[in-house]
Amino acid sequence: MSKFKQSLKNSSYLQSSLTLFLFFASWGIWWSFFQLWLTSETNGLGLSGSAVGKVFSVNSLVTLILMFIYGTLQDKLVIKRHLLIFTSCVSSLVGPFFIYIYGPLLKNNFTVGLGVGALFLSAGYLSAVGIFEAVSERFSRLFDFEYGQARAWGSLGYAVVALVAGFLFVKNPALNFWAGSFFGILLLLNLLFWKPKKEREENETLANEEAEASVPSIKEMLSLLKSSHLWAIIIFIMFTWTFYNVFDQQMFPGFYTSLFSTAALGEKTYGTLNAVQVFCEALMLGIVPMIMKKIGVRNTLLTGVALMAIRIGLCGFASTPMLVSGIKMLHAIEVPMFILPMFRYFTLHFDIKLSATLYMIGFQIAAQIGQVILSTPLGILRDNVGYSTTFKIISGIVILAAGYAFVILKKDDEDVQGDPFIRS
């Protein structure tokens, strides 16, 4: 608690927390209902499972390309905000884009809509999220605050908007998209006008010739692709986080709302449940760093994978709203126990100068490649065999990936090339 009170006096922590809060609020107000907007006959476009799979696949394809560009650019920029400001400009336009461009294109010219939508969503959100997280993590090391605590404010922002997202969606989905623009504008203003003193001083230091060593070269970035261990991590991510994202984003909202007597009731309940779950997730993001210090980075990550397989698998057997709601709450524990140790694993076993590129290639891009490959086939599988069987298959694959992770993940004191990790 004393460390948290000390963080409240740290302007860099406060600015990073507000940035993440506003970004996830701008994203969450519409993203939590994106799949329902695509499939709903009454409040959306009424697309089939296979069509939704194509949307997610093309989004992922464009996202993985932009993620590599974003990651390399941000590592060259170090802590400069140019890229964050660009993405927040895109976020501020999400309302008019969905209402006047994206929605009409998907209805009238689906193929063009796929491409245009993928470019916009990737530039403003799907690729941007990794950069916001990577920059915040870098700030935490430079300006002495706990990254998990700052990232928790991002989840809190998502939770706050999720409380009202379901009610807005039932009334008029356009309200969700306009609210996204509102928070995007606030995010842009925050990035433009609030720059803490320590950040300004650090940027001046990095501008000096003596600081050149802290900026990675293109050769160093490309050398990452020669790392066999990085490729082992990429395979691990593709068969865990990728499958989980397809399950959670592409399938779970429709599955959950189908359990209710009416779509409107399901959509409202889903919005409330999502908010409660993300509030708990924000709390866990502050607690997981303490758990990690007790049991270590590797063990925390393996625990997160186990919880992932359990949650997906249980949804394959559950059939009542109350039971599925309880299973959904595992998300609040599982996601922090996967994301935070994964990030720490990169800064522990790889060069920290390349943290943004590593996070984008090893985590975000790996997940997107998997989604490009898997979204459409899994959407077709769901259309043919239903949610229950699809969830059981996904859970089985994640269990196998957990066994693979147990073999390939390095111990915390093994091959330390970045910041050492010391248990408390």
Image (cartoon, rainbow, N blue to C red):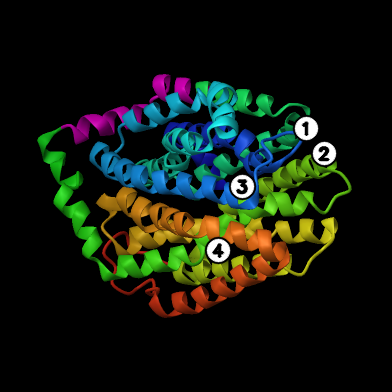
Q: Which residue is at 44% across, 53% downward?
A: 368
The numbered mark at residue 282 is 3
**Mark 3 burial class by Cα count in 10 Å: few <14, some 14-19, many 20+:** many
Instruction: Give yes or no for contact between labels 1 and 3 (Cβ–Cβ under 8 Å).
Output: no
The residue range painted magenta reads 186-207
Q: Position of residue 251 (x, y in %)?
A: 65, 54
Three-letter amino acid code of the residue under disc 1: Val
Residue 291: which numbered mark, if any? 4
Residues at marks 4 and 2, CA–CA distance in whole angstroms: 39 Å
The residues bearing labels 1 and 3 have C-alpha atoms spaced at a distance of: 26 Å
- Secondary structure state at the residue bearing disc 2: helix
Magenta segment, principal secondary structure?
Answer: helix
Dots 1, 2 in contact, CB < 8 A: yes
Lower sequence index among marks 3 and 4: 3
Seen in the picture, residue 388 relative to 49 is either above or below; the reply is below
Residue under label 2, please give it. Answer: 264
